[in-house]
Amino acid sequence: MTEEGKRFQERCIAILNEIDTAVATGTGDRHKITGHIRISAPPSVTSAILSPQVSGFMRRYPEITLDFFVTSALPDIVRHRIDAAIVLREWPGVKMASRKLGSMNRVLCASPAYLAEHGTPLRLAELSQHNCIQSLLSGDPEPWIAITKGKRRNIAVGTVLCSDNGDFIRQACISGVGIANLYEFHAKADLEAGRLVRLMPEKDLEKVGLYAIFPHKDLVSGGTLAFLDFMQMRLPGNS
């Protein structure tokens, strides 16, 4: 099949899925939504939010099959036939259609061992004198942003390690490498278990949006919408 033929086939399949969805919704039987969907998401979102819920989704929608791609980067969603790419960003940053699923809180964290050796910073200005672990966004260190009286300001940090993988950053933080600016949902279990300590909880850090990006705004399948609706209801703060 030619590439043009494949694209035509995909459009036909999407339209048929929409018809199935309309019928299922009209009869009140959304559980009968069928189809095959392909989703991508970052490792931290996958491990902390999506993976624990996927069995519930598949029980609720047994006629839907799922391919799941775990990646820190935004994939080529047209080339790889991704139905929805879930990303953590201040804004989607792409020209394709998107849907905001929620806003994720961030927390400053360090291990008890790191704090015992280096001391506990009490002011944001002190972070420039500490070992800090930053995430990479499009190859560059992602800035740490504080909200003070409604205004954004960059926090100067003493960076010693960068990574584009949230799980790597969290583990490095637990092992005592330095201070990290983690998503609250990603650090929650470690904070509760005492593996990490939250720093300066009174400070307001900028939240980051969780978005779903689609290749075609008018051809989002019923299965994709069902997946996003199901997961959005179970996000921290939405349930």
Image (cartoon, grey):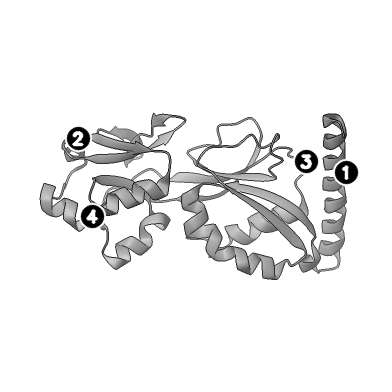
Q: Is residue 113 left or right of residue 218?
A: left
User: CA–CA distance between discs 2 and 3?
Assistant: 47 Å
**What percent of the width, then of the height, locates residue 159?**
26, 34
Q: SS at mark 1?
A: helix
Residue ID at (57%, 64%): 53
Q: Above or below — where is 224 with respect to 193?
A: above
Looking at the rendered image, the quarter that the N terminus falls into is top right
Which mark, residue 12? 1
- What's the distance in space between the residues labelled 4 and 2, CA to CA? 18 Å
Mark 1 and mark 3 in contact (Cβ < 8 Å)? Answer: no
The residue type indicated by label 1 comes to Cys
Disc with the residue nearer the chain's start (3 vs 1): 1
Check disc 3 and report its element: helix, strand or loop.
loop
Of 38 and 228, the residue lying toward us: 38
Q: Is residue 128 left or right of residue 228?
A: left
- Residue drawn at (70%, 53%), measured in percent from left and top? 225
Bin the neighbour count of mark 3 within 10 Å (Cα to Cα): few under 14, some 14-19, many 20 and up: few
At horizontal 38% and vertical 34% (from top left) the residue drawn is: 142
Name the spot of residue 6 as percent of width and height, x first: 84, 36
Q: Which mark is residue 218?
A: 3
**Residue at 75% across / 46% down in the picture?**
220
- Which comes before the other along the chain, label 4 or label 3? 4
Contact check, label 4 and label 2, Cβ < 8 Å: no
Q: Residue furthest front?
A: 1
- Residue tagged 2: 128
Marks 1/4: CA distance? 53 Å
How dense is the environment of label 1, judged by Cα within 10 Å: few (below 14), some, or many (20 and up)? few
Would you name the residue on which mark 4 appears?
111
- In the foreground, 15 or 174: 174
